[in-house]
Image (cartoon, grey):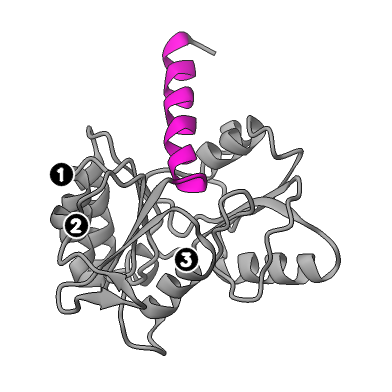
Amino acid sequence: MGPLKSANELKTRQLLDHAFDPKAIAVVGASATRGKWSNEVFRHFARHYEGTLLPVNPTRDEVEGVQACSSVMDIPHNVDYAVIVLPRDKVLAAVRDCVSTKIPIVHVLSAGFAETGGNGVYLQRALVEAVQGTSTRLIGPNSMGIYSAQSRLTFARDSHFAPGTIAFVSQSGGLCYDVLLKGQARGLNFSKILSVGNSSDLDWADYIRYFAKDPDTSVIGVYLESVGKGEEFF
């Protein structure tokens, strides 16, 4: 491995630390309306996460009792990790704002991109172009989310945070959900789980390399619907 590749891998690992062990999280598009998906995502964080949590909502002063910011540009804190739960057509502008405010990791949970074909392909390409050459990297879009036992982050309401040494990376969000809950029900505990979604920027190879260097992880489980970089996988 050359020195440039080693340096790039180190930088990627440091960036992913912001996602799995963030000090401050912004949930962009967090709804104050119970029953909406974007409200449920925010509530997962609010129930368990012990760091600084910042909802971004242009029409509400607070979400679940937490003071809201009207836009990403108005966030008063340095944010490690932004989670975007906006409708598809509003995602690109939010990603650009995250780049402008130098948020290291942006995780787009919103769907409707390349997996739908047509205009979704072009919208996803625009997301990648928005982060290229910047200090921001992108997870997703079309992702279920992230689980970290250490940081008490989860995408599943009924999960717990007993520390384990198993990491799991999956292209299927539904499988992430099942593996976490059914695994825990059978006594398996996890260190970290990631739903990669469409892997528009960071991809499965970045995540596997990250888990391979993670001191909390000794086993890595992988579910991929397509490999793409076959030689790199082996």
Circle nearer the N terminus (3, 1): 3
Q: Is residue 135 above or below residue 119?
A: above
Q: Are marks 2 and 1 in contact (CB under 8 Å)?
A: yes
Q: Residue at x 25, y 48 (%)?
A: 77
Q: Is residue 226 left or right of residue 212?
A: left
Question: Does the magenta portion include 219?
Answer: no
Q: Quadrant of the C terminus?
A: top right
Give the magenta-colored segment's residue range. 3-22
Disc 3 is placed on an element classified as: helix
* Distance of label 2 from label 1 (alpha carbons): 9 Å
- Local crowd size for mark 3, using a 10 Å CA cut-off: few (<14), some (14–19), many (≥20): some
Residue 17 against residue 77 in the figure, above or below: above
Q: Secondary structure at mark 2?
A: helix
- In this rendering, would 175 be left or right of 55? right
Question: Residue flagged by tag 2: what amino acid is it?
Answer: Val
Q: CA distance from mark 2 to mark 3?
A: 18 Å
Q: Secondary structure at mark 1?
A: helix
- Chief SS of the magenta region: helix
Label 2: which residue? 72
Give the CA distance from mark 3 to mark 1.
24 Å
- Mark 3, residue position: 45
Residue 13 counted in the magenta span: yes
